[in-house]
Amino acid sequence: MSDIISAPASQAHNHSTDSTGTDGTDSTGIDSTGTDSTGTDSTVGREPEAGGLTPYLDPLRVPETLCPGSGPEKVELKSTWVRLHSQMAPTHVWAYNGQFPGPTIDVRSGQRVRIDWHNRIRSGPYPVAAGEAPAVNGAPAPSAQPGRGEGFVEIKEVADLPAWSVTHLHGAETGGGNDGWAENAVAYKDTQLSEYPNNQPATTLWYHDHAMNITRWNVYAGLVGMYVIRDEEEAALHLPGGTYEVPLILSDRNFETDGRGRPTGELLHKVRRASAVPDKETGKFVALPFSGPYTLVNGVVWPHFDVEARWYRFRLLNASNARIYNLALVDENNRPVRGVVQQIGSDGGLLPRPVAVEYDETALRGLSVAPAERMDLLLDFRALRGKRLRLVNVGGQPAGTPDPARDVLFPQVMEFRVADRPVTDRFVLPGVISSSFRRLTHETPHGHRLVVLAPPGTKGGGGHPEIWEMTEVTDGSARPGQDGVIAVTGQGEQTPKIYRRIARTFDDTLGFKVAHGDYELWSFLNLSGPTHPMHIHLSEFQVLAREVYDASGFDPAGATTTIPVTYTGSTAVPVNEQGWKDVFQVRRNEMVKVMGQFTGAHGRFMYHCHLLEHEDMGMMRPFVVMPPEVLVFDHHQAGHGGH
């Protein structure tokens, strides 16, 4: 998490172009022989290779900063080549302004910005080879193995995909017409015109492709970038800035391999089949979400970053398709380094107070970052002069140790190299970060929604996990045992409530209509499925509760409950999760309750799982925000009868 690199300053802001340079280096300044652009042999003294590549060999790249003015800002989607590691050939990517990741767009709160997302990508060849690896002995095999492996079945239709893309500014309070509706994608030479009021507190957003059915591949091809909003409250903190404020965009990738098993640089989206037999209803094999063996930070595989012995600010984003990172900071011997990391912000802005982030060796628990989550971090390197620190991804083994069973084949993420020279740093960590922050409570007048996350294998679900929108039934017209009916006994309740499913696929009838300005409490109940990072467009929310449920009474074969799903207890909401958020991890057998106000814009939006493979498979639903004066005349609200 930092922004000063060992390469010359001129190299730090070099970006990918449409081809490799004529001087033998690509546009990142990394020579294909393993020699950096200064002529130094960068392989000397490195640890053994992992997956055909040497960790911490190449310097971190820092994306260019783009500060829009009063007029429209054109951002071009381009097909280009970029070297992701100096020991690989350049990789074909699609990227904003030809940079992977795209430029960091930097604006002020209240500054209205217009961006023309101009598609300059000619159709073909698609930069991603996609396919499935079969299950072994009826069980899914680890997917994070480099290359295709045995039995890989390519999805031929992916190679023919056009450059059809729509950009969504994730976390933005903007009208439905500017939000990047998934079906409003544009093709080559067309432009998506979007306006962003930026009437939000200081925060870290990001922009990415959101095209219907193919988001997982377009994002994987490189269409991601960071977007920063600043305000006066943040400025008054005098946080580390300039070269001491650095975006860190994490993602994971897989690559084709050559005859020696070394990665070639060609992007490979390999997922595994959930079982050895196809779904009995559709006859199709069900694919699990993607996880890749190689972690990239700002488009570089396992980079290093030279820092001074002072405070740094790192804006961390998980831009992976589906990998949930469990991050720990360790030394060269994989021993935890403590007292360094403070979190000061989350998805929707600043936290009220800094939160110390420490790795729990007993529970193997570090900083959990799901796809699309952002963490605003401060790192204090003052007492670590001359040290090398490593950010690693922890599976089910001690930090820094591979765990192939959990698809953590290579735990490396990046390395920080702290300079030995002393520096003067007058920054002092404030005791209060945001004095304007207010915690929401159940006493705030609000409406209720229940969303059930149905597990794979549920009747009628095609083998994929689903989103079920539910409505409470009190007139006896629905009862457990019927398809789409579940009974839930909540905290402190003696009699279960009965809910009926009103929607389960994206194209089902619109179910949720919200009055602009209303507060709503949305409860996401995960019935025995994997962890789903749920994202709601337009508004920011606060996590009010994490409750544990006994879901054994849910019968997937009947898509109903045989006995009520029952509350068994609660877990504390972590302090660093009590700020404003728009992505919420909903774990197995858990009900997560989030509250927010739907304000700032009107129109049709969506909410979905941010595991992109789940989103594309249908875990996405629309909702509409309209003026309350208009909603009074609505005759077709789901679950309320009507005409």
Image: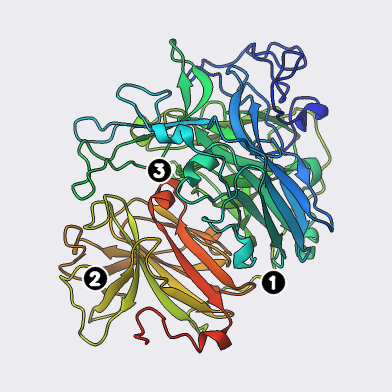
- The residue drawn where x is 54% and y is 51% is 210
Q: Nearer the viewer, mark 3 or mark 1?
A: 1
Q: Position of residue 551 (x, y in %)?
A: 24, 62
Q: Earlier in the sequence, mark 3 or mark 1?
A: 3
Q: Which of marks 1 and 2 is nearer the N terminus?
A: 1
Q: Mark 1: which secondary structure?
A: loop
Q: Which amino acid does label 1 sit on?
A: Ser
Quadrant into which the N terminus falls: top right
Q: Which of marks 2 and 3 is nearer the N terminus?
A: 3
Q: Residues within 10 Å of mark 3 (few under 14, many from 20)?
A: few
Residue denoted by label 2 = 486
Quadrant into which the C terminus falls: bottom left
Q: Position of residue 300 (x, y in %)?
A: 61, 30
Vertical placement of residue 312 versus 175, above or below: above
Instruction: Tell me the distance, in whole angstroms, between the alpha carbons under discs 1 and 2.
Output: 41 Å
- The residue drawn where x is 44% and y is 71% is 522
Left or right relative to 515: residue 533: left
Q: Mark 2: which secondary structure?
A: strand
Observer able to see residue 471? yes
Q: Mark 3: which secondary structure?
A: loop
Q: Which amino acid does label 2 sit on?
A: Ile
The answer to which image quadrant residue 147 occupies is top left
Left or right relative to 632: residue 600: right
Q: Residues within 10 Å of mark 2 (few under 14, many from 20)?
A: many
Residue denoted by label 1 = 436
Residue 362: image tag? 3
Q: How crowded is mark 1: few (under 14 residues within 10 Å), some or many (20 or more)?
A: few
64 vs 318, nearest the viewer: 64
